Amino acid sequence: MARVLVVEDDPVIGPELESALTVAGYRTDLATTGARALDLGGAVMPDLVLLDLGLPDDDGVTVCRRLRAVLPQAVIVVLTARTEEFEVVVALDAGADDYLTKPFRLTELLARLRAHLRRQVAPRDDDRTVKVGRLSLDLPARRAYVAGDEVALRPKEFDLLTALASRAGEVVSREELMDEVWDVNWFGPTKTLDVHVFALRRKLIDHGEDPQRIATVRGRGYRYELPETAEG
């Protein structure tokens, strides 16, 4: 039975989430402050964390970063009323795996949690590497390098880069990426894909990769450009 830590200070939403998750079969703990979340996180070692970014005692992004340090294997899903894409990207950079924008449907939340848990236990390919130009992916170790320099990627970013680079030069549709990276039974909007592509591009650029390496193919999806076809 998976364990979920709910970090939510709203006196209505927090208990409702705790109750709904318990009914759905999860062991559930509730924290209403960032400090309590860190204490509980280290004590109960949850499989999943639902983290509201608007906490009363600390910035949610800072709490996310600290929870990631304590819980390197847990799935962290941030809950936010914020609509600015940059703020979501900051949370992803801080260690979050996914996000939900309030208000959200409980059915969508539960579907996402199930999808993340399935991805956690999915078998890995233990003897493959992917190399495209300056990019090298060590799939068994789940590590990415640009010209030998390691790029720190979150789990979904690594999966997304693998899905694109392993089919370099081809257009990979949005639907294919959602199926492969998130789950074939993914429930909800696909904007999370765009946010992850934005974050992934930024990290690759920071390591000297071509800004156009991941190309948007309007109306279809994305393509990881081969070195000889990428534009500067």
Image (cartoon, grey):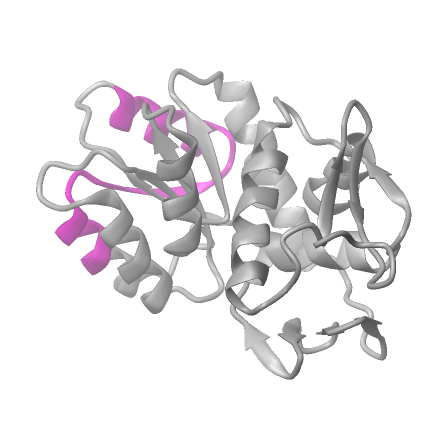
The reply to whether the magenta stretch includes residue 26 is: yes
x and y percent of residue 81 in the render?
32, 23
x and y percent of residue 49 in the render?
39, 47
Q: Is residue 144 left or right of residue 138?
A: left
Determine if residue 24 is in view.
yes
Q: Tag count in the figure?
A: 0
Residue 112 versus residue 107 in the image, above or below: below
Residue 189 versus residue 194 in the image, above or below: above
Determine if residue 49 is in view.
no
Residue 50 versus residue 134 in the image, above or below: above
| Residue sitting at x 19%, y 59% | 39
In the rendered image, the residue lying farthest to the front is 232
- Quadrant location, the C terminus: bottom right
x and y percent of residue 14 in the render?
26, 28
Q: Quadrant of residue 139?
A: bottom right
| Residue sitting at x 59%, y 61% | 204
Residue 96 versus residue 128 in the image, above or below: above
Q: Which residues are magenta?
A: 13-39
| Residue sitting at x 79%, y 22% | 219
